[in-house]
Amino acid sequence: MVIRELYLKRIRPFYHSELIKVITGVRRCGKSTVILQIMDELKNTGINDEQIIYINFEDYKFHKLATADLLYEYLQQRIRKTHKTYLFIDEIQNVKNFELVINSFRATDDVSIFITGSNSKLLSGELASHLTGRTVEFILRPFTFKEYYDFQIKKGNNKKSDTILEEYLEWGGFPLVAQEDDHNSKHVILSNLFDSIVLKDIVLRNNVSSPQALLRVLDYIIANSSTTVSGNSIAKALSQGGQDISAPTVYDYLKSISEACVCDFVQRYDIRGKTILSYQEKAYVCDLGFFKLRKNRVKDEFNYIIESLCYNELIARGYTVYIGKTHRGEVDFIAEKQETRKYFQVAYLLESEQTIEREFNGFLGIDDSYPKYLISMDKLKLSRDGIVHIPLIDWLLSPED
């Protein structure tokens, strides 16, 4: 088992806090494993088993608790008034009005509450109104490359890091896929994961009337990961291919896809004007395996693959990410965390002088002193003018900051 320290170190300061810990992420990215690891850490510090309550709503034995009243009754019987209780509820979105139950125990009992869900909007709507200011959210991704690499080494995989990176670029980082060695098994598991996510977290959850139309939109988004998209442009592109679909319908699908944590839609930030721009968002798929599964790759698409990889890495490291716009052009990523900011340009290979100039010139128009990085798969470092060039694999395996 890979200890997911990248996330645990951010959650750990809140273990005993009355703030509700909300852990979200795409289905099967490892949320349940993180919950179990937190429980183990608590036990290692002296917390007794009777102080811990764990409910997993994907386990059939808990299916009878999937209403607010029954969940409340069950927890009321289990929670003791004599000591602090640590409450873990996995895939809580399966319980209608769960936020009322969570808020009740938060307000009346000595509890530390952890909840997970395969939906990015657990903090929206009613939950937001009942729990405003009383939650802290953590977004999980499938394995980062470093986690994938560590997992392969623990399995006894003696391949070189470059070879393991090639596998990761092809198959992505879902833990269930990572544990398989046979390519056919990987493909079957990845395909089943994709189908499960589409069915349970998009189609059924949102009562989608035309799953095939949604799938066409999702395929388009995945195939165009790291490129600019909009509902209008997708509707036009699909209609030109003989698949009529309206822009409002596309926008509804994009919302559902985003909420299921399958893809992110990233806003542009005007560096000079210091404002967020509400148009021309870029899409990024959550795992590169989906890119392999839903689209045949060609060589010139590796720039998009590497950019998607770097975006997901930054999110996993806890950054808020924007696309940077300057009066001279665009920088791939502005990454912000607490009081820090970093700028990133990403390229597959710096294979010509023209490419080198284009990537370094992407930082022109940025006149502040925050760090600037260029990441590519080249082994030779070409740092200049205060811009640090880092080989991709070195950056991926470096300590997260």
Image (cartoon, grey):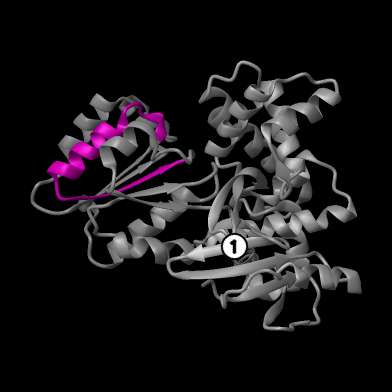
- Given residues 139 and 329, the one toward you in this image is 329
Residue at image position (56%, 63%) is 335
Residue 185 in sight here: no
Quarter holding residue 214: top right
Q: Is residue 219 left or right of residue 133?
A: right
Write down the residue under mark 1: 272
Q: Residues within 10 Å of mark 1 (few under 14, many from 20)?
A: few
Q: Does 80 appear above or below 257?
A: below
- Given residues 400 and 304, the one toward you in this image is 304
Q: What segment is highlighted magenta in the picture?
A: 93-117
Q: Position of residue 325 (x, y in %)?
A: 66, 58
Q: Does 396 appear above or below 126?
A: below
Q: Is residue 148 left or right of residue 293?
A: left
- Numbered disc 1: secondary structure: loop
Residue at image position (48%, 41%) is 120
The kind of residue tagged 1 is: Arg
Magenta highlight on residue 109? yes
- Given residues 45 and 247, the one toward you in this image is 247
Q: Position of residue 230 (x, y in %)?
A: 68, 36
Q: Position of residue 350 (x, y in %)?
A: 84, 71
Residue at image position (31%, 28%) is 97
Quarter holding residue 349: bottom right
